[in-house]
Image (cartoon, rainbow, N blue to C red):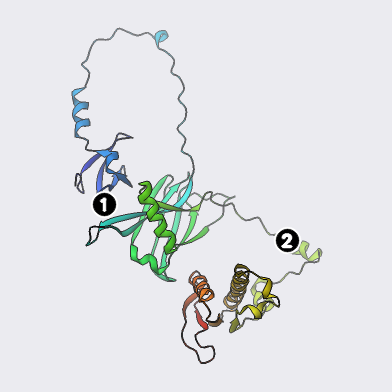
Amino acid sequence: MKYQIGDDILVLHSNEEGKVIEIINDKMVMIEVRGVKFPAYMDQIDFPYFKRFTEKKNIPSKKIEPKTYVDQVPKEKPQPNQIKVSEGVWLSFIPKFALDDFNDEVVELLKIHLVNKTSDGYQFTYQQMFNGEDNFSLVNTIQPFHDFYLHDIKFEAVNDSPSFALDFSLLNPAKHKAEHFEVQLKLKPKQVFQKIESLKDNNEPTFSYTLFSVYPDRAEQALPLDSLKAKGYKVYDAGKVKDYLPPARSVIDLHIEKLTQHPAGMSNFEMLTLQLDELEKWVELAIAHKQLELVVIHGVGSGKLREEVHEYLKTRREVKRFQHQYDSRFGYGATQVFFQY
């Protein structure tokens, strides 16, 4: 290995010096330059000793210059301002490769960075979950045009449906900007495996997901209630909103014949979409009424509807857990859902 942790290095394209802080694989290292950590290919860096040696040797000798008068000084041409372009905020994943027992290259870890390519700084709350259960959380700040190392997850944990929730607020609040902004991301194993293969083919170091391009504006002020009432709108007390909601159900049946009288003319995609919309409606009502349990009847069949139901439930924070097991009433055709508040 050409480099070791702690080695001084020179970034070739920027001529800046830094240090090696981690060996990612036989082609890449993690380096730190002026407090910023990022991955680099080994052919993008070099040892700085030749640069230092030549800089010392090339010091020009002093010589007496002729006097220069004020009217002989040329006017400097104005230099264009160096403007950093805003590209948004995203989560970046750096795979760390290793060799297995058969000398094949495999991914060992995913290193997770929060990347801020905007002119604003943010305070953020970060939460990472597996199958809806907390795994890692953090509250910190990130400065403009910086990245922030969050943590690592084992690559095999991608099969446990990792999800990420972030809540941002501006370090320098602005009147027209939102007080905070929430965003969620969920990784699907198949997509991650495809991205890893694409990285290998294109010789790229990372894959990323955009969280937002522009921090959102503050929501517009609500219209005065009296003017709404005068126009004939019904205005309810928000504290009594549950009084105006439809009642929740303890059992819902997603069989297509229960949802429509004309299933024969529908495609499989249309039927599945209708079933998932019905699921979402009753889950929302269950949560609004602070219901503790819900039974979802999806049948046995090919298992496609059951899989989609489970995938949806994993995305809901209010779902504490769910179980699919034999029930004397529904056999193996139902899932019991437990909520938390």
Residue corresponding to mark 1? 25
Helix, strand or loop status at disc 2:
loop
Q: Which labelled disc corresponds to residue 131?
A: none
Tell me: 266 left or right of 60: right
Q: Where is residue 78 in the image (x, y as percent from the top left)?
A: 46, 22
Q: Badges 1 and 2: C-beta atoms under 8 Å apart? A: no
| Residue at (55% x, 49% y) in the render | 174
Between residue 30 and residue 119, name the one nearer to us: 30
Number of residues whose C-alpha sits closer than 10 Å to that of mark 2, classed few (under 14), some (14–19) or many (20 or more): few
| Residue at (47% x, 77% y) in the render | 320
Q: Which amino acid does label 1 sit on?
A: Asn
When the figure is inspected, residue 172 is found, relative to residue 163, above or below; the finding is: above
Q: Which of marks 1 and 2 is nearer the N terminus?
A: 1
Q: Position of residue 39 (x, y in %)?
A: 32, 47
Q: Where is residue 141 in the image (x, y as percent from the top left)?
A: 41, 53
Q: Which residue lies furthest to the front in this view?
A: 264
